[in-house]
Image (spheres, grey):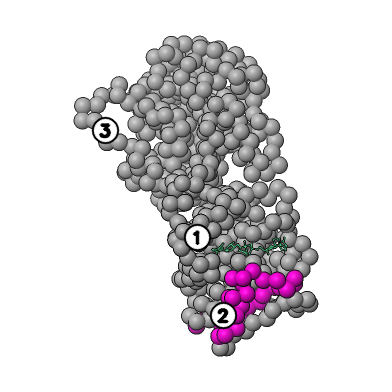
Amino acid sequence: MIKIFSTDKVRELDKYTIQNEPISSIDLVERAATVFTSEFCRRYSKQTRIIVFAGQGNNGADALAIARMLTDAGYRVETYLFNPTMRLSEDCELNKQRLLHMEKIEFTEVVNDFVPPELEERDVVIDGLFGSGLNRPLTGGFAAMVRYINQSDATVVAIDIPSGLFGEDNRKNDPDSIIHADLTLTFGFPKLAFLLPENAEFIGEWKVLDILLHPEIIASTPTQFTLVTEEDIAAVFQPRNRFAHKGTFGHALLIAGSHGKMGAALLSAKACLRSGAGLLTVHIPGRGEQILQTAFPEAMVDLDQHQDHFSSVSGIKAYSSIAIGPGLGKHPDSAKALEQLLQVVEKPLVIDADALNLVAANKDLLKRIPPRSILTPHPKEFDRIAGESSNSYERLKKAQAFAIDHQVCVVLKGAYTAICTATGNVYFNNCGNPGMATAGSGDVLTGIILALLAQGLEPETASVAGVFLHGTAGDLAAVYRSEESMIASDITDMLGKAFKQIK
Ligand SMILES: NC(=O)C1=CN([C@@H]2O[C@H](COP(=O)(O)OP(=O)(O)OC[C@H]3O[C@@H](n4cnc5c(N)ncnc54)[C@H](OP(=O)(O)O)[C@@H]3O)[C@@H](O)[C@H]2O)[C@@H](O)CC1
Ligand SMILES: Nc1ncnc2c1ncn2[C@@H]1O[C@H](COP(=O)(O)OP(=O)(O)O)[C@@H](O)[C@H]1O
Ligand SMILES: [K+]
């Protein structure tokens, strides 16, 4: 797991490292600038004209150190230090002196009026105005400078975080006063803001650079937010017992499909068996029988009394895990049947798609959802259940609170799907691609999670591992098919390779 700390916490980790490594603050700045410079040099040639904008704090200190290192490496660098209040942090002042001691530098300290340099498309701007020390939205000259940089066609590389962006909550920020970076090279840990869709335009591509903060303090400092890695998931999948039989891997029940949406049941069913469930029964409306049995003989079928939609299900105690929702439709009979199911079911359920919409239409059902159930909404489905949010930070906080309040697991789907657990933890998924924004890929995810639950994984683990498996298979499908051309069943087709890659 990669921990995601708030910017306040990162400052404490910096401080602890300085005291206990021990290392001086100026040397930690030097370390940060060194890793930034080496990554920068890998990406941009020495022919590039580089314009460094430095601020008064330690983000500026980094920028001035980077200007020195790039000059040393043979780049042509113009540096502008903004110092309107004539007050620099100690490390910033020291780095200013170090830079001034160099030969052949182009350095301007801006106190009052300023005529900005012409910026052209082939230039690279290094943004070191503000980092994690930002404590209010940018205004005045700084905001004007940010707008000037944003209006240019130059490439922008941000140090640590684009200037003007807060690491977490940007609800009260002014989007016009935030740098639009093409690349953000951040120190130590990803910032929460990087994972939220409304910030993509500010951050561009991002990469974490290790500055070797003290490992003990990283390990012992708690955080609710983490980024899942392949290593974490590899540990989840154990080798199968030589004497295992299909009963060992559980019997899953999928309640899905309605007239015109039987494909969702198929997609989900196939993903379930491809994810290792021992047995699968699909409960579908009568009319779906032939479709399902022909297209997918490995699944068993339990027919609903109704031809076109879900109206009742019985015998649920026989199943190791149950998912409901893909292509279900919102017929009033289905609403009643869902209510009846929730009255009798005891095990955690996977609730997706139209089943979520039915819950949203009758919020009393929320109280009946078995504890540790898994809800897999996309943002719109989540808003229908929990109310509108003004942005995705707010939605994330709501999903986190919702999971605690209702003692469920909320899989809030998106580019960085957030798995919010009943204990308040949030696991972000970092794989997958925009090719997965295609009809039915959510149905595939439901089938995967259902299968992992059937095999005995805890709901939280099944959710985190299921989302990772889905994203990995999606990435493999994109390589084979392209993001444009891939469809949901391609994700299922790549599940085998995904398992092999992860294990
Ligand atoms: N040793 C370390 O800690 C390491 C830190 N590292 C680097 O340091 C960065 C953090 O540095 P930092 O804490 O000095 O904050 P930074 O973002 O440069 O600016 C703060 C200054 O801005 C001011 N200010 C704030 N908002 C403002 C506004 N809207 N408009 C105008 N002014 C505003 C605020 O002053 P104020 O006006 O509030 O008194 C303060 O003076 C971090 O991102 C990373 O790059 C790495 O080198 C690794 C080692
Ligand atoms: N840009 C993206 N990057 C990574 N994953 C994505 C992206 N867009 C969509 N996905 C994934 O695809 C799935 C889409 O689910 P959903 O919206 O329910 O689709 P559907 O209703 O068509 O089945 C989710 O798991 C989501 O995380
Ligand atoms: K910055």
Q: Secondary structure at mark 1?
A: helix
Say whether residue 220 is left or right of residue 8: left
Q: Residue at x 47, y 11 (%)?
A: 314
Q: Is there any visible trace of residue 25 in the rendered image?
A: yes
Query: Callout 1, which amino acid?
Result: Gln
Provide the residue designation for mark 3: 240
38 in relation to 383, above or below: below
From what the image shows, is residue 282 above or below residue 107? above
Q: Is residue 243 left or right of residue 59?
A: left
CA neighbours of label 1 inside 10 A, class few (<14), some (14 to 19), many (20+): few
User: Residue 67 has which mark?
Assistant: none
In the image, is 162 to the left or to the right of 189? right
Question: Which amino acid is tagged 2?
Answer: Arg
Q: Residue furthest left?
A: 242
Q: Position of residue 164 (x, y in %)?
A: 68, 59
Sequence-first tag of 1 and 2:
1
Q: Going 64% across and 71% down the picture, which residue do you hit?
A: 54
Mark 3 neighbour class, 10 Å CA radius: few under 14, some 14 to 19, many 20 or more? few
Q: Which residue is mark 1?
A: 19
